[in-house]
Amino acid sequence: AKPPYAIMATRKSFAVLQCGWPSPAVAERFGSYGEMLERLLARPASQTWRTFDVELGRDMPTDATLRGFDGLIVSGSRHAVYDDAPWVADVAALVRAAVDRRQKVLGVCYGAQMIAHALGGRVAPAPVGWEAGARRVDLSLDAIRKRPYARAFGASSVEVCQLHSDAVLALPAGAELLRAS
């Protein structure tokens, strides 16, 4: 006998704004940033992913297109979020629109800087210069005390590979620091 109800898996969809490409040697071995993010983050088979190669405005989606996704992920890039380039301003506008409609948004490296920049934070060259290699990233004590969900991000400190010379020097209004290097 069939049950009187059906359990339906909720299909989730994610858009990746790929803001750059890894070096040719890395891309040959691991793929694009979009492919790496999908492999790292995709869990259930019911997820769908679409990568938009937005670097230099090559495949810039419209805001209407992004409304159809459950979440937005902004990748890393060799560019700076304060570059005076039309495509950078377009990505910032898409991030602001997604946040305004309360769409889930995740930024990785440049992507995190882009979210801060788009929402009014200050991103500039890091006072300590380049951070390169495996570095410890700490979960803020304030995040541990105020936000129980912050522990979902893992241990209080983790080693991650980093390569950047810019930093978020001032958070946007209302933002909370969860991790820092």
Image (cartoon, rainbow, N blue to C red):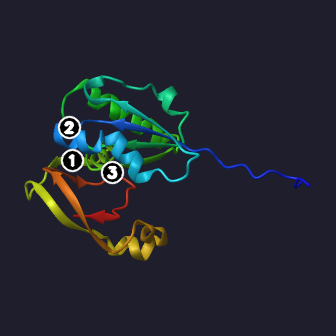
Query: Disc 3 marks which amino acid?
Result: Pro
Which image quarter: residue 55? top left
Q: Is residue 119 visible?
A: no
Residues 97 and 87: in front is 87
> Mark on residue 172?
3
Label 2 SS: loop
Q: Residue furthest right?
A: 1
Dot 2 or dot 1: first in sequence order is 2
Which residue shows up at 43% across the image and 71% down it? 151
Which residue shows up at 24% across the image and 44% down it? 29
Residues 53 and 114: in front is 53
Which residue shows up at 30% across the image and 24% down it? 57
* Label total for image: 3
| Marks 2 & 1, CB-CB < 8 Å contact | yes
Residue 86 shown left or right of residue 6 in the figure: left
Tell me the mark number nearer the camera, choosing from 3 and 1: 1
Residue 35 shown left or right of residue 101 in the figure: left
- Tell me: residue 68, above or below residue 136: above
Which image quarter: residue 143? bottom left
Dot 3 or dot 1: first in sequence order is 1
Residue 72 shown left or right of residue 70 in the figure: left
Q: Can you give x and y, in whole percent of width and height, for residue 108 in the image?
A: 31, 49
